[in-house]
Amino acid sequence: MARDLFAPLAPGYERWARVLSLGQDKRWRSQMVTRLAIEPGQLALDAAAGTGSITRLLQDRGAEVISLDQSHQMLVPAVARGAVGVIATAERLPFADEQFDVVTFGYLLRYVEDVAGAMAELSRVVRPGGRVGMVEFGRPAGAWRPLWRLYTRVLLPTAGLVAGEGWPEVGRFLGPNIEEFAGRFPPGRLARIWEDAGLSKVGFTRLSLGGGLVMWGQKEAAASSGTL
Ligand SMILES: C[S@@+](CC[C@H](N)C(=O)[O-])C[C@H]1O[C@@H](n2cnc3c(N)ncnc32)[C@H](O)[C@@H]1O
């Protein structure tokens, strides 16, 4: 399903993603990357990399980045700007255990059927002590929620109509999809899923009145098996 949704979006993706997130998405991504304390030369996997917005932030900090996505079309602009592209799904990563210093993913888990399984797979490829970061849409609470609903149910589908091929579907799909995911996986529950996947020091922050969510964690160091 996600493959069909994203295939036509690549050419204008970054421009329209900015418009549809009211200009907030760049800030969310850079907050996430800041949390990862990246050092030059580290090896990073950007899963669901799309056109490479997060990939480029990681590269700016000196990381060597592999950009993975299920959609060939989405990866084309990332590779054209110097990323190493791998076509695969996040649920079955074609990498050995504990290979990466850093794993990032933006706007992935809403498209995954088995969230806990995908988190276990993403965590599998991180070295002990390595870091994981996520950016995702959130659902504002309180008085902001009706305004957010108006935005996602009326303005977003309308903006999608003028954005070009593929975007009307995105405009209709996004609001209900974000809301359903946020209801099933509020940040506290998501954090526990991360911990069950072997990540510790899991933290999160809601941004832009709750419209954005950034989460981070660290792969637990392997338990020592010393004998007395
Ligand atoms: C909204 S885009 C986000 C791209 C990028 N992370 C960003 O922040 O701009 C979501 C991307 O996830 C990819 N995707 C969705 N499900 C996936 C999966 N199971 N495995 C790998 N990529 C997936 C889509 O092809 C798409 O490129």
Image (cartoon, rainbow, N blue to C red):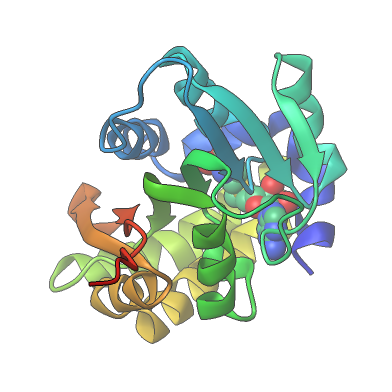
Drawn side of residue 74 relative to residue 193, left or right? right
Taking the image as drawn, is residue 215 in sight?
no
* Quarter of the image that includes the C terminus: bottom left
- Toward the viewer: 18 or 77? 77
Where is residue 44 shown, x and y percent of the image? 53, 34
Q: Residue at x 58, y 70 (%)?
A: 118
Residue at point 73% right, 47% down?
69
Q: Nearer the viewer, residue 227 or 225?
A: 227
Res. 157 visible in picture? yes
Quarter holding residue 117: bottom right
Vertical comparison of 157 with 9: above or below: below
- Residue sitting farthest toward the front: 228
> Quarter holding the N terminus?
bottom right
Residue 27 rendering spot, x and y as whole percentages: 32, 32
The answer to whether 197 is drawn above or below residue 14 in the figure is below
Residue 148 rendering spot, x and y as whole percentages: 32, 63
